[in-house]
């Protein structure tokens, strides 16, 4: 039986998908760690949302985030896990949910429902992950950050915003 702990990270390093060991405090680890936080925030949202369409969408997003993390944990790797098709799928989801909402006329204060609040938390963590991924790209010229991943992070925050509005819309 294998154990949960490996002891390989006890000295402040972690392994990437490519097998390379890097510092846990590095920009790459910060970036994919924030994507991992998005997944947790979305899990909280899925547990608290009441609309089945939103729960289903959130579950799809959680599975997609595994590809985001794989991309970020593949320093210099040739394979890109996030593609233009993922960007298109996120944009389609945004458009589908947004088309069912009334026009936005004012700022939204988060917290109308537990599910919507968790989606807003996921939105802000996504914005942080996007900033950290951009920082990684600036700091490590050889980082080879997948442009589709950056676009997907941007679209994901928009989608979390739209899903939060959908979750609180009483006409749905």
Image (cartoon, rainbow, N blue to C red):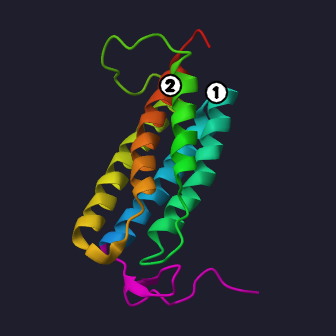
- Whether pointer 1 and pointer 2 mark residues with C-beta atoms closer than 8 Å, the reply is yes
Q: Position of residue 45 (x, y in %)?
A: 55, 39
- Image height of 39 relative to 23, above or below: above
Residues in magenta, as a range: 1-26
**Quarter residue 171 falls in:** top right
Instruction: Tell me which residue sits at (71%, 86%) in the image.
Output: 2
Q: Quadrant of the image for the C terminus?
A: top right
* Dominant secondary structure (helix, strand or loop) of the stretch shown in magenta: loop
Relative depth, front residue between 29 and 43: 29
Q: Looking at this view, name the residue that lies furthest to the left.
A: 139
Instruction: Tell me which residue sits at (55%, 63%) in the image.
Output: 81
Q: Write down the residue under mark 2.
A: 113
**Quarter residue 29 falls in:** bottom left
Instruction: Tell me which residue sits at (39%, 53%) in the image.
Output: 150
Q: Please give the label number shown on residue 88.
A: none
- Image height of 87 relative to 33, above or below: above
Q: How many residues crowd mark 1 within 10 Å: few (<14), some (14–19), many (20+)? A: some
Relative depth, front residue between 47 and 103: 103
**Quarter residue 120 falls in:** top left
Q: Write down the residue under mark 1.
A: 50
Element at label 2 = loop
- Residue 6 magenta-drawn? yes
Query: Which of the marked residues, 1 or 2, is nearer the chain's N terminus?
Result: 1
Q: Position of residue 155 (x, y in %)?
A: 44, 41
Q: Looking at this view, name the residue that lies furthest to the right.
A: 1
Element at label 1 = loop
Relative depth, front residue between 85 and 96: 85
Q: Is residue 95 left or right of residue 146?
A: right
Number of numbered discs overlaid on the protein picture: 2
Q: Position of residue 71 (x, y in %)?
A: 49, 66
Q: How many residues crowd mark 2 within 10 Å: few (<14), some (14–19), many (20+)? A: some
Q: Is residue 170 left or right of residue 37?
A: right
């Amino acid at each position: 039986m294998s154990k949960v702990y490996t002891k390989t990270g006890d000295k402040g390093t972690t392994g990437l998908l490519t097998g390379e060991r890097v510092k846990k405090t590095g920009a790459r680890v910060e970036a994919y760690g924030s994507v991992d936080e998005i997944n947790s925030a979305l899990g909280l949202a899925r547990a608290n949302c009441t609309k089945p369409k939103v729960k289903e969408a959130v579950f799809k997003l959680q599975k997609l985030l595994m590809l985001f993390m794989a991309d970020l944990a593949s320093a210099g790797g040739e394979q890109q896990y996030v593609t233009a098709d993922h960007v298109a799928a996120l944009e389609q989801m945004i458009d589908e949910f947004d088309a069912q909402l009334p026009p936005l006329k004012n700022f939204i204060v988060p917290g109308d429902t537990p599910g919507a609040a968790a989606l807003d938390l996921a939105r802000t963590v996504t914005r942080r992950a996007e900033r950290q991924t951009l920082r990684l790209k600036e700091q490590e010229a050889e980082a080879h950050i997948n442009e589709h991943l950056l676009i997907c992070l941007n679209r994901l925050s928009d989608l979390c915003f739209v899903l939060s509005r959908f979750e609180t819309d009483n006409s749905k």
